Amino acid sequence: MKEEREKKAEKQVIEKTKTGRIRIAGAVLIPFFVICGYVIGVKGMQVEESFWALFPPLIAIALALITKEVYSSLFVGILTGALFWARFDPVQTLNHVFKDGFITVIADAWNVGILLFLVILGMMVQLMNRTGGSKAFGQWAGSRIKSSVGAQLATIGLGVLIFIDDYFNCLTVGSVMRPVTDKQKISREKLSYLIDATAAPVCIIAPISSWAAAVAGFVEGENGMHIFLQAIPYNFYALLTIAMMIMLVTMKVSYGPMAGYEKQALLEAYWKGVEGQTESGNEEIKGRVSDMVVPIVLLIACCTIGMIYTGGFFEGESFINAFANSDASVGLVLGSATALIITLLFYLLRGIISFEDCMTCLPEGFKQMVPAILILTFAWSLKAMTDNLGAAQYVYNMVNGSAKELQGFLPCIIFLIAIGLAFSTGTSWGTFGILIPIVVDCFQNVDHTMMIIAISACMAGAVCGDHCSPISDTTIMSSAGAQCRHINHVATQLPYAFTAAAISFVCYLIAGFVHNPWVPLAAGLVFIFVLLYVLKRNTANT
């Protein structure tokens, strides 16, 4: 009874705090909209292709971090963008929100493919759970991985191995490693961070990935893949993020909000409210390890084949070119659907689950992915509002007007601009498309090395902003893969991402003058080690 009363009192405190934050946000937003309605709607101030175009996503992100409510925050951001675009005309605003926003993004073929991929992944996870495959794998891995450090290193290792696509990485690593990390009492927030930090940061330095293809496509007048390979050693954020993860795990360091969740995860109270918790009872397990491993292997193989199929591999294209030309959305759907059908047949032939139970798992898997689908739909709609306001053109004009005068400082400045753009729009690829052509235009046939460094700074900054942003596809899917509350993942990940970003900024400042990747990279690694060592010492002394 005492524990229940304490839990109820704690819940009331949390709700009271949240209500207070919402009221404060409302008190700030209402005057803001009144002022904007006057200067934009009445006075006709220019909004398109100006700094005002970045306000909708910034408002959504700020509200999400303050109120801890994702859906309402994203909708306010969408509404803000529509109001600005329609100059506060209520009819046009409503039309823009739903017709040009939600309906348009849901009807987009690429977006539909990603949503289908999410749903199919949810179905496969539900099937693996129902057959006992997830639990059997968790016990098998648990008997071999006997420490928290081992479980986290295994998660990082698997994330590095699945480098083909970040969406695929997030959901697959979460499904496979969640039973193992649950058993070792690793918080879902920490698992989400490990998944997210081995998704885009790994894909952006992997030559055979959908990301490499995207970057190569934006480099006109050059061999895009060759430029991508040359830029890998200069991609300081990606390399330092991976190194920082390993140091955090092996040195057993946690800081910021993550430290609190890691302590809570050692208590049973934390796991009572966790979705999809892997049970640890001694009841008989009907499933086998193969019931988990076979579907995952099928998924990896089929998705790889699906992607190269869409890139023309079976029509004579080379493996690398097929990846470069692949349609990840279609390829992942084709591959995951094929893997789902084969998995169903595999389970039915094994007799481990009835046909009726198989069919029951399909809608259950869909339900499991509804939160991620909702957040993605809102995030895409918010991006549509920002695009219609000309945010990309504003950033292009701002950078293009001063880039040629910055010279040695260009890499670190490009890095910061890419972070800001990717953070506010939630997209890495859109940031590549805006900034890389500017860099190529400035340094092509002038300074090849500086062009490589600046392109890598753009790539690194885009990944960093994408990594931090609450409205990023990868951030959303990392939360879904770990079955972690999305806003918790964002809040706990930010201090780690900002640490790597700050050190990367210094590395780009050095690289802009030494024109060598190894000196700044070595300095960055030393900075991270010293910082984590100091944090560990301070934590031990408190």
Image (cartoon, rainbow, N blue to C red):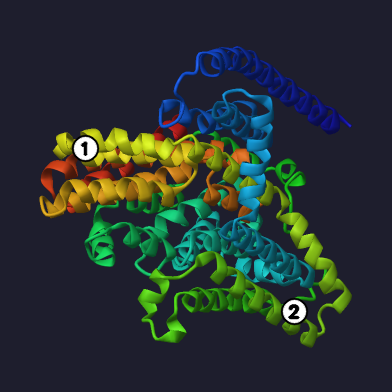
Q: Nearer the viewer, residue 139 or 306?
A: 306
Whole-percent x and y of residue 382? Answer: 57, 39
- Above or below for 179 versus 314: above
Which residue type carries mark 1? Ala
Query: Residue 354: which quarter of the image?
Result: bottom right
Give the labeled residue for mark 1.
403
Direction from residue 222 to residue 117 in the image, left or right: right
For mark 1, give the secondary structure.
helix
- Between the C-alphas of marks 1 and 2, the distance is 55 Å
Query: Residue 514: which quarter of the image?
Result: top left
Q: Nearer the viewer, residue 169 or 302?
A: 302
Direction from residue 134 to residue 455 in the image, left or right: left
On the rendered image, what quadrant is the N terminus found in? top right
The circle on residue 266 is none
Whole-percent x and y of residue 194? Answer: 51, 52
- The label nearer to you, 1 versus 2, is 1
The circle on residue 344 is 2
Direction from residue 436 to residue 171 in the image, left or right: right
For mark 2, give the secondary structure.
helix
- The answer, for residue 521, to whether it is visible in the render is no
Which residue type carries mark 2? Leu
- Above or below for 511 versus 226: above
Whole-percent x and y of residue 478? Answer: 57, 52
Residue drawn 50% across the image and 55% down it: 149
Labels 1 and 2: the sequence-earlier one: 2
Residue drawn 41% across the image and 28% down it: 50
